[in-house]
Amino acid sequence: MKNNEITRREALQQLGLGLLGLSLLSVLPVGCSKQGRHPDQKLLCNKCDGCGKCHCPYGVDIAANLTLYNKEAMAGRLPDPREGLSRHYLAESEAFIKRLNEIPRLAQADRCVTCLRCAGSCPQNVDIPTALHQMEALIQKVKDDGTLA
């Protein structure tokens, strides 16, 4: 193999990272108020009602993750990465990660391997893989910004 060639696995990883970056953009709140914050985080909720009919063969607690995300959005407590490293953003991020840690580590959204076995199983028609990856992107951004891991 030449020096400038990459393996198929490396290409897929790079593609996956690019898609993850796009999903991060889709998780960021839009429609800023004058303060630069989303005027109504309730608009960011998914339709998950926590029924538990979805199943992950890898142990991700889909309902718990999506319900947590919805509760945070409904309460207006989702960290907004566009605030930069402001005190408010860092405090919201730390509180969000603490609440996330109430879900067992191996059942958290970032454990999703995108096997797609959960796709189409939601009676509320939630696109589960996309919703989990949006949550994962927000979690990763918050962690990368230096809050609690």
Image (cartoon, rainbow, N blue to C red):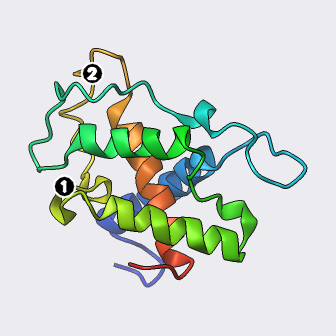
Residue sitting at x 16%, y 24%? 53
Residue sitting at x 69%, y 36%? 40
Q: Secondary structure at mark 2?
A: loop
Q: Is residue 64 above or below residue 99?
A: above
Q: Does the rendering let one see residue 14?
A: no
Q: Which mark is residue 131?
A: none
Q: Residue furthest top?
A: 123
Quadrant where the N terminus lies?
bottom left
Q: Secondary structure at mark 1?
A: helix
Rendering coords of residue 142 (x, y %): 52, 69
Residues at marks 2 and 1, CA–CA distance in whole angstroms: 18 Å
Front in this rendered view, residue 6 or 124 = 124
Q: Is residue 141 above or below residue 46?
A: below
Residue sitting at x 82%, y 54%? 36
Rendering coords of residue 140 (x, y %): 46, 66
Rendering coords of residue 122 (x, y %): 27, 21
Quadrant where the C terminus lies?
bottom left
- At label 2, the amino acid type is Cys
Rendering coords of residue 112 (x, y %): 26, 52
Q: Residue furthest front?
A: 75
Front in this rendered view, residue 138 or 35 = 35
Residue sitting at x 43%, y 24%? 47
Q: Quadrant of residue 62?
A: top left
- At label 1, the amino acid type is Ala
Marks 1 and 2: in contact by CB < 8 Å?
A: no
Q: Does the rendering let one see residue 18?
A: yes
Q: Which residue is mark 1?
A: 107
Q: Which residue is mark 2?
A: 122
Decide if residue 55 is on the left or right side of residue 11: left
